[in-house]
Amino acid sequence: MSRHFCLGASALAGHWWWRLVILSASIMLTLWWTQPVLALDTCYAVADNHDTFVSLEKGTGKTAFIGKTGRKDIEAIAFQSGTDTLFAADASELGTINIVTGLYTPIGAFGSGNGSAGLISLDDVDGLSWDKATNTLYGVARRIDGAPDLLFQIDPATGAVKPGAFNGADYITVGITQKGEDNIDDLAFHPLTGVLYAIANIGGTGGTLVTIDKNSGAIQEIGTLLDANNPSNVIDDMEGLSFFNDGNLYGSTGDSGPDIADINRLFSLDLASGQARLVGAFPPQYGDYEALACLTADIADDDQDSIVNAGEDVNHNGNLQDDNDDGDQAPDYLDSDDDNDTVPTIGEDPNGDGNLFNDDTDADGIANYRDADDDNDGSLTAAEDANQDGNPANDDSDGDGVADYLEGGDSDGDGALNQVDTDDDGDGIPTAEEKVNGATNLFTVDSDNDGKPNFLDADDDGDSIPTLSEDGDHNGDARNDDADRDNVPNYLDTDSDGDSLGDSAEWSANKQDHLRDCTAAVALCTSNDADADGAPNFLDLDSDNDGVPDQGEPDGDPNGNGIPNWLDAQSAQWVVFMGAVVFQK
């Protein structure tokens, strides 16, 4: 979507390519950039079993990777109201998470509390929430004996339980639902009413939305977490709970519930009924979203470039005034184009994931938004503006969908620079057509997850066989070749013939790269067509042409000649006779 806001005329200097519309006495600017997931005015989550911190778009569930927390047991996070201080519970310890880097910093242990159940160690804290009305941080601790969970107050400076906070007791027990749900998996104070909401379940099964009296621990059941799209389905294992600043409540599920259809998803919750409406699924590469927190106030982003002010402290000295990447008159936190390359900072997100920090096209260690030569081709980004309209983003000399300023070098070594090469990696598939599985952004398509997008990767599936060599019918286009008919073309299939050996095992890249389990000093061990039948091993169901399919040949080298069964036409065959395994020559 486009983003509109008003600026004085002086703010337009150097940015005259923006569409200008005169409206009253001000100038309205329309930034023709896809709006990323912002670091402000948004929600955050922790994938517990990957110690991963992400921001997320509350309307779609789209996430942007921020960083590793460095801790494995974070099960609850909560913002201090009106600030960007994000508290986190790491089992028995309170800490904070930097929303710019994702890194966790410890504060201190919760310790033990005394109350109606005696002295209890608060070593498994599953919920946190900040009470705006009293400026108090609350936590809820799991009982190891299966008894009701404990609600307590926390000193944010030390992490310790506040002694005597409940009429002399350090904690209060939380009520149990009529279904016997005694696990409170997270807490959330309503930012407008101050009511404390919570999720109750039994070991991740089922779920009920409740309110908790913060003075007594008594609960009021609102309703079961019924799926709005399938009312017969109860959403299991909802472990994260948080309000947004508009009073809307969101919940995230982990991966411990019995219903696989419910795991690792974001839901919006109806405060009157508890009904859960799916917002979206979290990325499959992360899992167990036990912690969720949404900002209850906008955090300062003075230049509106999607990086909060705190994130523009490049030298990490706490002084925003001395961070100025382009050396102009404006420090970065007030500069909407930090590197002065004429591409606004907010637009320097080629992979479109909303995280400007992980876009480094030339892999020089400097993120694009701070790099005046994004592709390191020797030409400054601002100069790669062929049509001279002041916007390098719309200059694409070869029409392949990648702007010239992001397409430096000669990736395939064919003598044609990428900017004028319609097949940057020389794999026979035009750059513009290297989008798979419905992707719309070339930079996000990385089939083998090697950090190199397909349009720059000559081996798209990472099986050691060049994409160009996976063109079985030799028509110059590997996209229409699917040897095992599994609807995955060979160049994206790590086992093209479906014989269970794997393409990399059946391919020799050089004379030192022996085929799988082949140890003999013979040419066969590096032959990509062992039986010389014209079909390379990775496309041949019987590589040694001995009449036994590769998939049916047992592992090993029975005759000890250094050539494994699947390559050795002379090897012994396994035969079962009278219930015993014997050899047959």
Image (cartoon, rainbow, N blue to C red):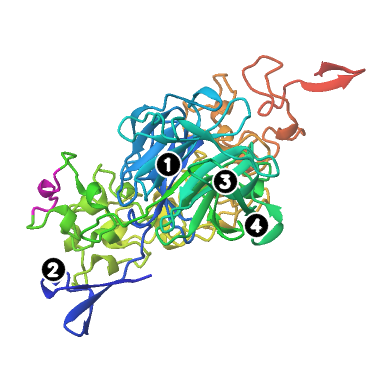
How far, Cα to Cα, is label 2 from label 3? 52 Å
Residue 67 seen in render: no
Asked whether 315 or 533 is in front, the reply is 315
Q: Position of residue 76 (x, y in %)?
A: 46, 39
Q: Residue at x 34, y 71 (%)?
A: 2
How far, Cα to Cα, is label 1 from label 3? 15 Å
Q: Quadrant of residue 336?
A: bottom left
Q: Which residue is mark 3?
A: 199
Q: Position of residue 374 (x, y in %)?
A: 24, 53
Most extreme residue toward the top, as rendered?
A: 560
* Lower position in the chain sequence, tag 4 or tag 1: 1
Closer mark to the observer between disc 3 and disc 4: 3
Q: Position of residue 563 (x, y in %)?
A: 63, 22
Q: Are marks 2 and 3 in contact (CB under 8 Å)?
A: no
Q: Position of residue 322 (x, y in %)?
A: 10, 46
* Lower position in the chain sequence, tag 2 or tag 4: 2
Closer mark to the observer between disc 2 and disc 1: 1
Rendered-image quadrant of the N terminus: bottom left
Determine whether 22 is above or below 564 in the image. Answer: below
Q: Which residue is mark 4?
A: 227
Left or right: 483, with 140 as reference point: right
How many C-alpha atoms fall within 10 Å of the one at disc 4: few (<14), some, or many (≥20)?
many
Q: Secondary structure at mark 4?
A: strand
* Lower position in the chain sequence, tag 3 or tag 4: 3
Closer mark to the observer between disc 1 and disc 3: 3
How far, Cα to Cα, is label 3 from label 4? 15 Å
Q: Amino acid at mark 4?
A: Asp
Could you say which disc has been placed on residue 77 in the image?
1
**What residue span does the magenta drawing correspond to?**
319-327
